[in-house]
Image (tube, helix red, strand yellow):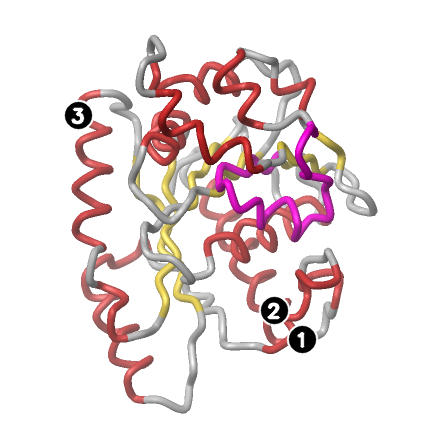
Amino acid sequence: MPRPDHPRVLCVANQKGGVGKTTTTVNLAVALALHGNRVLVVDLDPQGNASTGLNVPHHAGVPDVYDCLIDNVPLSEVAQPVEGIPNLWCVPATIDLAGAEIELVSVVARESRLARAIAAHPEQFDYVFIDCPPSLGLLTVNALCAAQEVLIPIQCEYYALEGLNQLINNINLVRQHLNPTLDVSTILLTMYDRRTRLADAVEQDVRNHFGTKVLNAVIPRNVRVSEAPSYGQSVMTYDPGSRGATSYFEAALEIAMRGVNTGGTA
């Protein structure tokens, strides 16, 4: 896959839970890393699911993203190489991160702590993926301040578009006050069930509303995608021939091509 001419920092956000944020983060990161890109995953969700999916230790006591946000520990000291995937690193999240929302409230420049940590990282990455928690609190605001692009996974369900306005409004607020370069660059449709009319209707709604921001690749409902994390793997390595893996590969390729075609922003 082509490498971008400058690092792309993507925040994977949607305050609705269970839409495939972590699954998308893990599989896109692995797909890009397996095809020649240097990728960093920052797990910003206290549940630590991205760390689990990449088989990176994140039990209590492991240096994690909390140390970067609260104690100014450099990212390079907490980033761990992902076993078996060259060019891929992960900054894990432990349960300590659950208290960070409250602790950040009184911290100076609380919204830009993550941005400063990423900017100070000496390694040059092609992609940085930030996996957000399912909320619009200070952790997600930190991710939006650190990113240039927002990737929104949207589940092909009836409630998919509910709450999306709230997310877009928050992104606009961050753009106005904290990060003027922020752009919703990519929408990815997940958990798509071709047998239902509803999935087709949601897809049409999203494509009509967001136009070319919506990737042509669509992620289907696929058992292999759900099984992979229980083995500490992405679906890309767990079952490379499955529909889930090929769909995520197509999505990663599309993101890579868009970055090259438009000088880094889609």
**Image position, residue 206 (x, y; %):** 25, 65
Q: Is residue 54 magenta?
A: yes
Q: Write the start and end of the magenta stretch as one range.
A: 40-62
Please indicate whether residue 1 sits to the left or right of residue 143 in the image: right
The image shows residue 228, relative to residue 149, as above or below, that is: below
Q: Residue furthest bottom?
A: 195
Please indicate whether residue 3 sits to the left or right of residue 116 in the image: right
Task: Measure the C-alpha gap from mark 1 to mark 2.
Answer: 9 Å
Residue position for label 1: 242
User: Which mark, by number, is residue 225?
Assistant: 2
**Image position, residue 152 (x, y; %):** 36, 52
The image shows residue 109, relative to residue 81, as above or below, that is: above
Task: Measure the C-alpha gap from mark 1 to mark 3.
Answer: 42 Å
Front-most of residues 88 and 215: 88
User: Which mark, by number, is residue 176?
Assistant: 3
Q: Amino acid at mark 2?
A: Val
Q: Residue furthest right?
A: 84
The label nearer to you, 1 versus 2, is 2
Mark 1 lies on a secondary structure that is loop
Q: Amino acid at mark 3?
A: Gln
The answer to the question of whether label 3 and label 2 lie on touching residues, with beta carbons closer than 8 A, is no
The answer to the question of whether label 1 and label 2 lie on touching residues, with beta carbons closer than 8 A, is yes
Front-most of residues 204 and 262: 204
**Image position, residue 46 (x, y; %):** 50, 40
